[in-house]
Amino acid sequence: MIRRSSRQLRIGRESVGGNAPISVQSMAKTDTKNVAATVKQIKSLERIGCEIIRVAVKDEASARAISRIKKRISIPLEADIHFNYKLALLAIASGADAIRLNPGNIYKPKEVKEVVKACKSKKIPIRVGANSGSLRIKGRTSQAGLMVKSVTQYLKLLEREKFYDIMISLKASDVSTTIEAYRKMAKVCKYPLHLGVTATGAGTEAIVKSSIGIGTLLAEGIGDTIRVSLTALPEDEVMVGKNILQALGLRRFGPDIISCPTCGRCQVDLVKIVRQVKTKLTTNNYRLSTKHFPALAIMGCEVNGPGEAKEADIGIAFGKTGGVIFKKGKIIKKVKTKDAVKELLRQK
C-alpha cells in the first residue's frame, strides 16, 4: 500500500503524520479530576503500548488536574474539550500536549481564535474532531459530506490565524459513513488523520466494526494515528488497535500467531494450547524474538499443519500423541503434547 502524504506534527514526544509510525491511542475512562485513578489507568495503558492518551475535560477541576497527571505519566496527553473554550485555555496552561476541539460545539470565531493563540504560544497542535452526532450544519449531502464540510469550514478559522499544526478526525457510529468521510477528507487536505469509528458498542461486534472501518482506510494508505472506541476497558482498545496495525503489516508488536480453526481431525486441545502460548508471550519469562520469529504457527493436524508450520518462522504441528517443532522450514524436535508449549517457547 502507498501511504497518503501528510504534514508531520508532534504531540509531546510522539510524531504524527509524514513517515512517522501510525500510533495507537486510547482515552482514559476515569474522572480526570481523580488524579490517582487517572494516573493508575494511564500507567496501565503505557505498559501495554499505548502511545497517546486523551482525557475528558468537563470542568475546571479536570483541566487543572492535567498538570498533576502529566508529572506522573510518560506518554503525551490530549485534552478533550467540548462546549466551553475556556476549558481549552485552562488545559493548555496546565500542560496538555494537544487539544481536541469539536466544531459542532466550539465554533465562535473569537473563541476559536483565543484557543489558537494559546496553542501557538505553547507550540501544541489542535485536533479538529468532528462527530456525526454533533454537527451544526445541515444540507442535502450525505452525513459523511456534512462532516467534511464542517471540518473544512473550521480549518479556515485556524488557517486564517496562520495555524497549521492540525489533526483531523471524522467519526460516525456507522462504518460506511466513517470510511466515506475519511476518503473525502484525504483528498482535500494534507493534515494528518486520526482514525476511529465512534460508539461501536461492546464485544465482538464492536471489534468487527472498528477493524473494518479503521482497517479499510489503513489498507488504502489513509490514517496517521488510530483510536479504537469500545464499551470496554481502554486496555482492550489498545490491544485491538495494535492487532489491526500488525494484521496489515504496518507495525509489529510481537510474533504473529498462525493457528488453525480446528475440526474433527484435531486430536489435541488446540484452543487451550494457543491460549497458553499467547499468555506466556505477554510475560517477562518468555520473549520470543520478533526479529527472528515474526510468525509462529500452531497447527492441529496433518492436513495443513506441517505445511503452515514450515512456512512460519517457527511452529508446531500436532498429531495424536505429540507434535513436531519446525524452525525455518526444518524439523528440529519431536515433543510430547504436555511439553509442547514449554519446548516451543524455549527456542532461540
Image (tube, grey):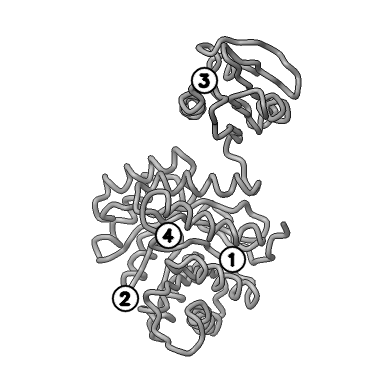
- Residue in the picture at 38% in, 41% down: 43
- Residue in the picture at 48% in, 22% down: 269
44 relative to 263 in the view: left or right: left
Label 1: few (<14), some (14–19) or many (≥20) C-alpha neighbours in 10 Å: many
Query: Sequence order check: which comes first, mark 1 or mark 2?
Result: 2
Query: Label 4 amino acid?
Result: Glu
Residue 78 is marked as: 4
Q: Are marks 1 and 2 in contact (CB under 8 Å)?
A: no
Which residue was labeled with disc 3?
Answer: 268
Q: How far is the residue under mark 1 from the one under mark 3?
A: 48 Å
- Along the line of sight, the residue nearer the viewer: 87 or 251: 251
Residue 87 image position (x, y, % from top left): 31, 70
Query: Label 2 amino acid?
Result: Phe
Q: How far is the residue under mark 4 from the one under mark 1?
A: 15 Å
Residue 213 image position (x, y, % from top left): 53, 61
Query: Sequence order check: which comes first, mark 1 or mark 3?
Result: 1
Q: In the displayed structure, would residue 27 be above or below residue 333? A: below
What is the secondary structure assignment of the residue under circle 4?
Answer: strand
